[in-house]
Amino acid sequence: MAANTSIFLIGPMGAGKSAVGRKLASMLDFEFADSDEEIEARTGVDIPFIFDKEGEDGFRAREAKVIDDLTRLNSRVLATGGGSAMEPESRAQMAARGLVVYLHASVEQQLERTRKGRERPLLRDGKPLQVLEKLMAIRDPQYREIADIIIETDGRQVSSVVREIEKKLTELSDA
């Protein structure tokens, strides 16, 4: 892996992308970015507010712009939103511009990790288990399509996941 290659973390909500991303960026001495945080910084409002005012389509358009902008930058770890891989152009940009790491979490693990949060618009209405199952059925193939590395995160601490990513990065650079 080239020293200026960026790493894009993809996966479902609750997979640990932000926590893993911060620790991985620190370990690699890279900048860290979170696409959801960037959207909030650019708009001055939180994501649930954007969903309320613009709907999911409006949010996804903003997300695609942020993914395009942030994937152009070098030497950074980018934690993406769970739906960032839904847009074919965003998938192509991530695949072409850096190394893509899919943090896989089972639906049960996602449910456990997201059950207390109120900031996840897609889980506010209805039955979270059914929503997560439906999202995983749609998004898992999209994540796998562009993943260079797949890491299982169920029941694991952030440091353990980061160490495994580091090991896989070393293996890739030695190949």
Image (cartoon, rainbow, N blue to C red):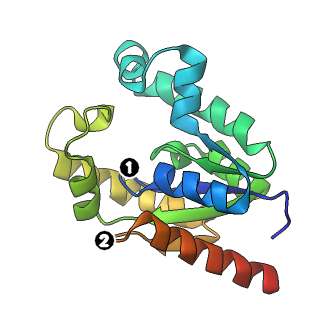
Q: Position of residue 82 (x, y in %)?
A: 45, 47
Q: Residues within 10 Å of mark 2 (few under 14, many from 20)?
A: few
Residue at screen point 64% across, 79% down:
168
Q: Which SS class for mark 1?
A: loop
**Are the residues at dot 2 and dot 1 in contact (C-beta closer than 8 Å)?**
no
Q: Quadrant of the C terminus?
A: bottom right
For residue 11, above or below residue 116: below
In this orientation, which residue lies closer to the viewer: 50 or 56? 50
In which quadrant of the rendered view does residue 111 lie? bottom left
Q: Amino acid at mark 2?
A: Gly
Q: Would residue 4 be found to the left or right of residue 17 on screen?
A: right
In this orientation, which residue lies closer to the viewer: 61 or 43? 43
Q: Which SS class for mark 2?
A: loop
According to the picture, the residue beneath numbered tag 2 turns out to be 155
Q: Position of residue 167 (x, y in %)?
A: 63, 80
Residue at screen point 39% across, 55% down:
138
Residue at screen point 54% across, 49% down:
85
Q: Would residue 146 be found to the left or right of residue 125 on screen?
A: right
According to the picture, the residue beneath numbered tag 1 turns out to be 13
Distance between the alpha carbons at the discs numbered 2 and 1: 15 Å
Q: Position of residue 51 (x, y in %)?
A: 38, 22
In this orientation, which residue lies closer to the viewer: 77 or 87? 77
Q: Pick out the residue farthest to the left.
A: 127
Q: Amino acid at mark 1?
A: Met
For residue 137, above or below residue 163: above
Q: Position of residue 135 (x, y in %)?
A: 34, 51
Name which of mark 2 and mark 1 comes first in the sequence: 1
Q: Quadrant of the N terminus?
A: bottom right
Q: Would residue 46 be found to the left or right of residue 99 on screen?
A: left
